[in-house]
Image (tube, rainbow, N blue to C red):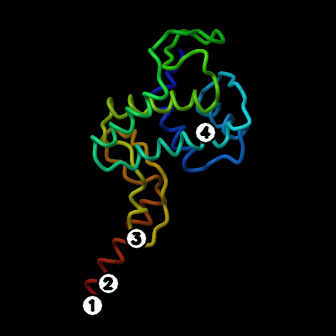
Amino acid sequence: MHLNPYGEYAVLMAASLADDWPDDRAGIEARTRKFGMTMDFAESPDDHWRTRGVIDEWLRVVDASEPGERARLLNDLMAHAAAYPRLTDHGREGWHLHYRDDANDSLPDVLRAVISVGTALHLTTRGIHRLSRCAAGRMKGDPCAAVVVDVTRNGRQRYCSVRCANRAAVRRHRARRSMTVH
């Protein structure tokens, strides 16, 4: 079975790149492999910084506070990335859909298409609210800015990790205690 790279996996890959940016192009390509992408990418000397630009554009979608703004930003991203859907069997991996021009196989261009369409599928099938920054980072003094891709059943994931959730709970508890002591 071939997993569609345009769904949850693409969004998780984008979050992984955003939260832990690789030092070089090889690191980006290794990360794509970790998330199941198998294709070979055309190589260009500007791939590293152009791919960083793709992730930065995507982070604007993550940080959009209003659903309409999020949709507009994502539509703009897809308009610059996606072509009409087409069936392909590159590498004899099994037939699957591509949402990009087959002639454009550069790393940043492929990732722009995969990430933007994957994000659109994630937000339309799971909910427009299911992509955000870690709620711990919204608390005073907490530096966490990790991306949260909510893939839970109930759609209520707010923290990037158990560690951040626990840290936030301790802060809330201490704040309540200090209010009752004074």
Q: Look at the numbered disc 3 and give the secondary structure of its residue.
A: helix
User: Is 119 or 126 nearer to us in this picture?
Assistant: 119
Query: In terms of sequence position, does the residue under pointer 4 or pointer 2 come before the other?
Result: 4
Badge 2 crowding class, 10 Å Cα cut-off, few under 14, some 14 to 19, many 20 or more, is few
Disc 3 from disc 4: Cα separation: 37 Å
User: Is 93 or 177 nearer to us in this picture?
Assistant: 93
The mark found on residue 170 in the picture is 3
The mark found on residue 51 in the picture is 4
Q: Which residue is mark 2?
A: 178
Query: In terms of sequence position, does the residue under pointer 1 or pointer 4 come before the other?
Result: 4
- Identify the image quadrant of residue 36: top right
Relative to residue 153, is residue 34 drawn left or right?
Answer: right
Disc 1 from disc 2: Cα separation: 6 Å
Badge 4 crowding class, 10 Å Cα cut-off, few under 14, some 14 to 19, many 20 or more, is many
- Identify the image quadrant of residue 180: bottom left
Q: Residue at x 72, y 32 (%)?
A: 44
Please say if the residues under marks 3 and 1 sit with CB atoms less than 8 Å apart.
no
Of badges 4 and 2, the one in the foreground is: 4
Q: Residue at x 49, y 15 (%)?
A: 97
Q: Which residue is mark 1?
A: 182
Q: Position of residue 41 (x, y in %)?
A: 68, 25
Q: Residue at x 51, y 28 (%)?
A: 114
- Identify the image quadrant of residue 74: top left
Query: In terms of sequence position, does the residue under pointer 3 or pointer 2 come before the other?
Result: 3
Q: Amino acid at mark 4?
A: Thr
Q: Look at the numbered disc 4 and give the secondary structure of its residue.
A: helix
Q: Is residue 117 above or below residue 166?
A: above
Please say if the residues under marks 1 and 2 sit with CB atoms less than 8 Å apart.
yes
Disc 4 from disc 2: Cα separation: 46 Å
Disc 3 from disc 2: Cα separation: 12 Å
Disc 1 from disc 4: Cα separation: 52 Å
